[in-house]
Image (tube, rainbow, N blue to C red):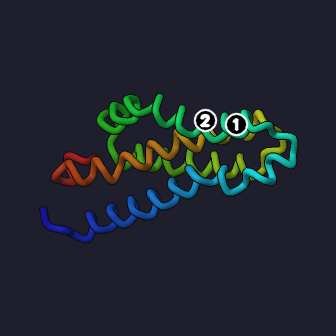
Amino acid sequence: YGLTGRRLRWLGWGALVTVLVSLYRLSTAVIAEPLMRRDTSASGLGTLHAAFFYAYALLQLVAGVLSDRVGIRRTATVGSVVLAGGGLLFSVADSYPVGLLARVVIGAGSLLCVIIPVLCGLVPTPRVRG
């Protein structure tokens, strides 16, 4: 499988998204102190951090089926929009429940984005990739 321009773009995009997802994954650790000053308990902070992983884990099967049904590019696009929306929602969250919902949305969008580079690497042709 030669590295054509299209494949390089997808792999580059996948690498950038993977870095972004890693930053989102660790973001609650970085902002733990300010959150604790805003009356967030240690268990609440743990739940907020874990919400990302709960959504990520629960949607893994759905993401694979979705990418098979509608295509990898559409799944990646939806994942990118969901990830960006979750990040924006988290940035303006003024309460714990909104922040928790935002972390779930970020986890869902992250999965839809991170699965894409894996699938692009496994499926040999653009026609099969969707």
Q: Name the residue under label 2.
A: 51
Residue drawn at the location 86% of the way across and 49% of the way down: 37
Residue 61 image-quadrant placement: top left
Q: Are marks 2 and 1 in contact (CB under 8 Å)?
A: yes
Judged left or right of residue 64, residue 21 is right
Q: Is residue 25 above or below residue 39?
A: below
The residue at the far front in this view is 42
- Classify mark 1: residues with Cα within 10 Å, few (<14), some (14-19) or many (20+): many
Q: Which of 75 and 97 is in front in this view?
A: 97
- Classify mark 2: residues with Cα within 10 Å, few (<14), some (14-19) or many (20+): many
Q: Mark 1 points at which residue?
A: 100
The three-letter amino acid code for the residue at tag 2 is Ala
Residue 126 locus on image (x, y percent) = 22, 54
The three-letter amino acid code for the residue at tag 1 is Leu
Residue 50 image-quadrant placement: top right
Q: In this view, does 61 lie above or below 33?
A: above
Residue 48 locus on image (x, y percent) = 67, 38
Q: Nearer the viewer, residue 37 or 92?
A: 37
* The N terminus - image quarter: bottom left
Residue 60 locus on image (x, y percent) = 40, 33
Q: In this view, does 69 lie above or below 84?
A: above
Residue drawn at the location 51% of the way across and 51% of the way down: 80
Residue 38 locus on image (x, y percent) = 87, 46
Residue drawn at the location 63% of the way across and 41% of the way down: 49
For residue 69, which numbered disc appears in the image?
none
| N-term-proximal mark, 2 vs 1 | 2
The residue at the far left in this view is 1
Q: Is mark 1 on a helix, strand or loop?
A: helix
Judged left or right of residue 32, residue 14 is left
Residue 2 image-quadrant placement: bottom left
